[in-house]
Image: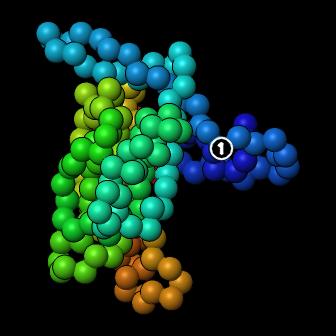
């Protein structure tokens, strides 16, 4: 229950006809728990408490100190995983930002600092990350291990209406391909 699109389901949640007046902006997703598996510490997600997953269009991380400031803001709001849009960083890499690790997917074809998506993951749950796939400067995919299932998060930065049709078509084709490549039993969050 909640506003349309808030369900964790295998396909988009059907629209709802009820009006919701008291809606919070947090989604209840499980907290992390350390389990020993094959002699290694592996983080898995359990459904006993909540973890905050957020999304944020930062407008640019291509400024001195912006990445560190991002980590401070996420920590202030107790966010565990954040999908970040419009990073304007080049290439695909990881970097530290305080108590977080930034997995970035930026422009690789030229040196224009435009677009860019990323995921910021708190370091204490970093071992639960199965994989990070930088698809393009507009789409990235993060897969996380949970106790009974895996969670696939897709971070994207869609082209605006004024963009040319080829750019929009390529974006939605890439998004469709990523969505269909995710294993069937994963929880998908876009």
Could you tell me which residue is drawn at 33 percent across and 76 percent down? 114
Q: Extreme front residue here? A: 64
Q: Position of residue 122 (x, y in %)?
A: 35, 35
Residue positioned 40% across, 21% down in the render: 32
Local crowd size for mark 1, using a 10 Å CA cut-off: few (<14), some (14–19), many (≥20): few
Residue 6 located left or right of residue 117: right
Looking at the picture, does residue 31 appear above or below residue 20? above
Q: Position of residue 22 (x, y in %)?
A: 81, 41
Most distant residue in the left direction = 39
Q: Quadrant of residue 187?
A: top left
Asked if residue 52 can be seen in this view, the reply is yes
Q: Above or below — where is 56 with respect to 91?
A: above
Answer above or below: position of 158 versus 22: below
Indicate the quadrant containing the N terminus: top left, top right, bottom left or bottom right.
top right
Disc 1 element: loop
Q: Residue at x 38, y 16 (%)?
A: 33
Using residue 100 as the reference point, say whether residue 50 is left or right of it.
Answer: right
Q: Which is more toward the observer, 159 or 175?
A: 159
Q: Which residue is mark 1?
A: 25
Q: Is residue 187 visible?
A: no
Q: Specify how the rendered protein is coloured.
A: rainbow
Give the percent coordinates (x, y) of residue 96: 24, 44
Above or below, 145 against 25 in this view is above
Q: Which quarter of the figure has residue 97? A: top left
């Amino acid at each position: 229950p909640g506003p349309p699109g808030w369900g964790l389901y295998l396909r988009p949640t059907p629209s709802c006809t009820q009006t919701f007046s008291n809606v919070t902006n947090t989604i209840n997703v499980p907290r992390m728990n350390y389990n020993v598996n094959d002699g290694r510490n592996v983080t898995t997600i359990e459904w006993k408490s909540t973890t905050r997953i957020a999304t944020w269009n930062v407008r640019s991380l291509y400024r001195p100190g912006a990445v560190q400031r991002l980590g401070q803001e996420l920590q202030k709001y107790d966010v565990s995983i954040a999908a970040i849009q419009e990073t304007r960083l080049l290439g695909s890499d990881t970097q530290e930002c305080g108590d977080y690790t930034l997995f970035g997917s930026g422009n690789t074809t030229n040196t224009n600092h435009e677009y860019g998506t990323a995921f910021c993951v708190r370091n204490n749950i970093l071992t639960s990350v199965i994989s990070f796939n930088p698809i393009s400067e507009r789409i990235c995919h993060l897969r996380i291990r949970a106790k009974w299932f895996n969670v696939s998060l897709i971070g994207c930065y869609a082209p605006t209406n004024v963009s040319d049709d080829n750019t929009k078509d390529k974006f939605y084709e890439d998004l469709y391909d990523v969505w269909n490549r995710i294993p069937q039993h994963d929880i998908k969050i876009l």
